[in-house]
Amino acid sequence: MSDAKFVERYTPKERGNHWIVALCFILAALSGLSLFQPALFFFSSLFGGGPWTRILHPFIGVVMFLFFCITMVRFWKLNRMTDADRKWMKSIKDVVMNREKNLPEVGKYNAGQKYMFWLMVVCMWLLVLSGFVMWRPYFAGWFPIDINRVAVVVHAFSAVILVIGIIVHVYAAIWVKGTLRAMMRGNVSAAWAKHHHPGWYREISGK
Amino acid sequence: MPSLQSLDIAARSATTTPSPSVRHTTEIAKLIDESKCIGCKACQVACMNWNDLRDDVGTNVGVYDNPSDLSPSSWTLMRFFEVEVEKDKLEWLIRKDGCMHCAEPGCLQACPSPGAIVKYSNGIVDFISENCIGCGYCISGCPFNVPRISKVDNKAYKCSLCSDRIAVGQAPACVKTCPTGAISFGSKEDMSIYAEKRAGELRERGHKDAGVYDPQGVGGTHVMYVLKHADRPELVGLPKNPSISTMVGLWKGVTKPIATALMGMAAFAGFLHYVMVGPKEVEEDGEHKSEKEQA
């Protein structure tokens, strides 16, 4: 291993955790969409039909939430917003158009990644709380109907926002070459780190 | 009810194309005349008899309501109300509760399972139980608190308005059995006329607030009431101006297509961005070499 060429970005535990959450998300999203949008009801076939989709969806969601909690605690501090982040966000157009000169220096995460993190935190909490209120046959009976009706709307809205967020998250990993291996193999090239996250690279390499 | 071979489906849950609707049937209605009801519960017996359902023996809750609530196997229920309609004037009101068979059913709008709830052109809203997935969205959608989910099979149940009897030209079991004629059945038009006539008679006899309960907030219902206090339907546990909750409308109305379009567009925008703007790549001097070394 030529340690100068690659730097570690995620530990095996972080990677494992991430992919458990990701897998649960895919399953929860497919089953949830089938119950949300009739045109996508066919997704329920993947889970063994309508009743099985209804049964499995909340359990998948709970597993996702529990593992996400670990991620949340682990990355909470790293995602604090700074003044540099707010400046970076102002030139988001340049970021999207791949014009990278004159952008403020980025640490381990750029502002886009940080916003994504907070979006996920908010959505996950809304989903788990509203999902609990809707969960039949176990818990839905505990809540008055008005609360239930708010919960179904909150659940649908936060799920849609999370799905769109994840689409952006996945695309960003495809868009920025060399990123995917950070989550697959744990490391990124030094050139990648220097280019995209110079503040973080300096911190870990002392260069 | 299990699904009947029907050519007259006016609406079907979670279905985006028209359902078989070539046959048109007369819009029907059941009319419940509160003033004629003696609370004998024959309708409850007829309902369980025709539908072959036996509820568990419950416990006395201190009033005549028995069972104490609608359940997966009790689709209709006499509810008893002791109310002081005005000062020092006690009245004992009795209402036969059950599905109202709304023209715009909230349950059907909320249901995510294709064909688990259908509305026939005669106005009956029927649960096709074998398609039910047990999510309880119909409960969220119903403005009248009617559907009940079985703890045994996790399917939702409610009054079918005896869709199987009506399909072969018979009146619902409860109508057939009512000894005082408090429940009548016929075309919606006839029943509306008869209801107004009855309300007029009641007003003549001193029930000045008598009127018909056919709430327009849900497009009218196919179970109507003649109420002695139509100005205060909440006296007998009926909502005054029922409508499908705004929340349910928001959830299952505009949100569905807009949200789906947004999700699709997000994915497509990503693809377009990739082919039009392109990926971000970093010059990796010597990366290929190190990949080979690792291999």
Image: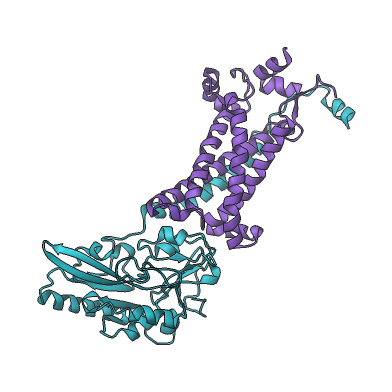
Q: Quadrant of residue B271?
A: top right
Residue B39 drawn at (x, y percent): 27, 77
In the figure, is residue B182 to the left or right of A142?
left
Left or right position of B206 against A114: left
Of residues B90 and B235, the one nearer the viewer is B90
Can you tell which quarter of the image residue A46 is in? bottom right
- Outermost residue toward the top? A207
Note whether residue B160 is visible.
yes
The purple chain is: A
Which of the 4 quarters of the picture holds residue B67? Answer: bottom left
From this view, report whether residue B154 is shown above or below residue B20: above
Q: Is residue B235 above or below residue A74?
A: below
Q: Is residue B268 visible?
A: no
Where residue B147 sits in the image (x, y, percent)?
42, 65
Closer to the camera in the image, B274 or A76? A76
Q: Is residue A180 above or below residue B35?
A: above
Q: Residue at x 64, y 38 (%)?
A: A171
Give me the residue at 21% from left, 70% from top. B92
Hue used for the chain lettered B: cyan
Where residue B240 appears, x then y in whole percent? 26, 61
